[in-house]
Image (cartoon, rainbow, N blue to C red):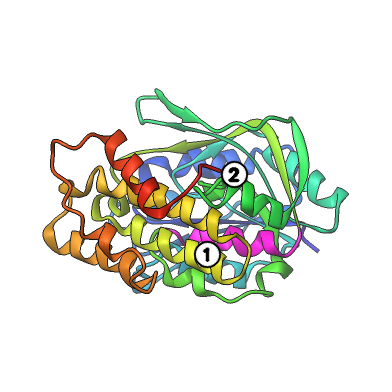
């Protein structure tokens, strides 16, 4: 049996594809297959992909006839084609160090209760300048999945780039595929579901590189405000499943809404109305008075944040 199936879902990333594919093929751990998928890219992605048609590691090349409209539906399709015990979704605009798989597979093999494992990642611009880097306080450790969610997945997605992680294929079939209905935060929900079912291995090693550019999905989501809408949905699901307490929930909600109100002037009136309604409806109208507060340009961020805390009667966790 093949140990790892590497899925490379591509859309319009021809300029980055060779770096991506080569960084996969040059891994020190070589027990893997590569499945390349293209979602009707309008650029010359097909030309680049065909250059790997005869490579012995490339088991399948899939060209969609109609654009799926969803990165996460491509994930699901690719996993269904995979033969490996572990899955690595290597995003088409990223690249990595040769030892990424070697480190993560070893961690998964050492503990059968581990459902996912990830390394640290550097976000950088096309000119090579570093935007930011993730970090972990230990060189490596296993964390109980529920503890991991509470500590690392409430106020943000610690596994912010799929290329930095691998997971057990069999665990994928133990939870619903609701994540495919999301446009932006489907990966966040995906890793939460994985974490619920076992331990998470975290490597402190910087082995993955994540490009930020004008063609990435996250940039469009931030511009539309979609990230706020889906963030609240995920937060509510954690509360519903009793993974987080009411206090934890409210604190996280503050952070999400605080981020929103400080930039809400950048969105269209229709987008603002939609986002406000999500906060209101998802919480049964509990925060209506707060949502209807008229923030003027003269109100400072500190005043807003302190008012939010007073309104929700919170203590900082």
Q: Nearer the viewer, residue 170 or 60?
A: 170
Predominant SS of the magenta segment: helix
Location of residue 26 with respect to 109 vertically, above or below: above
Q: Residue furthest top?
A: 129
- Identity of the residue drawn at 53% across and 62% down: 189
Residues under numbered marks 2 and 1 in contact, where contact means CB atoms less than 8 Å apart? no
Residue 197 shown left or right of residue 295 in the figure: right
Residue 3 shown left or right of residue 21 in the figure: right
For disc 2, the neighbor class at 10 Å (few under 14, some 14 to 19, many from 20) is many
- Identity of the residue drawn at 61% across and 73% down: 80
Q: Where is the N terminus found, in terms of image quarters? A: bottom right
Quarter location, residue 78: bottom right
Q: Which residues are magenta?
A: 185-198
Quarter location, residue 303: top left
Q: Is residue 195 magenta?
A: yes
Q: Nearer the viewer, residue 117 or 74?
A: 117
Q: Disc number at residue 75?
A: 1
What is the secondary structure assignment of the residue under circle 1? helix
- Identity of the residue drawn at 55% across and 54% down: 248
Residue 29 spot, x, y in % from top left: 75, 42
Residue 53 shown left or right of residue 294 in the figure: right
Q: Is residue 260 magenta?
A: no
Location of residue 73 with respect to 19 vertically, above or below: below
For disc 1, the neighbor class at 10 Å (few under 14, some 14 to 19, many from 20) is some
Q: Where is the C terminus found, in terms of image quarters? A: top right
- Identity of the residue drawn at 41% across and 61% down: 232
Q: In 3D space, how far apart are the residues under numbered discs 2 and 1 (Cα atoms)?
A: 15 Å
Q: Disc number at residue 164?
A: 2
Residue 98 spot, x, y in % from top left: 66, 34
Count of marks overlaid on the render: 2
């Amino acid at each position: 049996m093949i140990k790892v199936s590497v899925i490379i879902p591509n859309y319009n990333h021809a300029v980055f594809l060779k770096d991506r594919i080569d960084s996969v093929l040059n891994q020190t751990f070589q027990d893997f297959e590569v499945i390349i998928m293209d979602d009707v890219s309008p650029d010359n992605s097909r030309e680049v992909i065909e250059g790997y048609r005869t490579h012995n590691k490339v088991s399948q090349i899939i060209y969609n006839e109609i654009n799926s409209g969803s990165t996460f539906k491509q994930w699901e399709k690719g996993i269904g084609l995979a033969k490996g015990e572990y899955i690595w979704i290597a995003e088409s605009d990223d690249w990595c160090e040769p030892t990424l798989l070697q480190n993560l597979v070893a961690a998964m093999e050492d503990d059968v209760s581990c459902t996912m494992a990830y390394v640290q990642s550097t976000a950088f611009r096309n000119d090579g300048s570093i935007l930011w880097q993730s970090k972990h306080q230990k060189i490596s450790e296993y964390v109980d999945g529920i503890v991991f969610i509470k500590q690392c997945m409430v106020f943000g997605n610690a596994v912010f780039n799929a290329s930095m992680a691998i997971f057990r294929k069999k665990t994928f079939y133990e939870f619903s595929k609701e994540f495919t209905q999301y446009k932006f935060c489907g990966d966040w929900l995906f890793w939460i579901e994985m974490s619920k079912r076992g331990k998470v291995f975290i490597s402190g090693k910087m082995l993955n590189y994540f490009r930020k550019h004008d063609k990435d999905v996250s940039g469009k989501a931030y511009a539309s405000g979609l990230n706020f809408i889906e963030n609240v949905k995920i937060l509510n699901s954690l509360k519903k499943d009793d993974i987080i307490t009411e206090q934890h929930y409210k604190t996280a909600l503050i952070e999400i809404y605080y981020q929103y109100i400080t930039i809400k002037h950048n969105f269209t009136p229709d987008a603002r109305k939609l986002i406000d309604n999500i906060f209101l409806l998802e919480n049964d109208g509990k925060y209506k008075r707060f949502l209807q507060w008229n923030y003027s340009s003269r109100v400072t961020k500190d005043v807003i944040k302190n008012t939010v805390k007073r309104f929700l009667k919170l203590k900082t966790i």
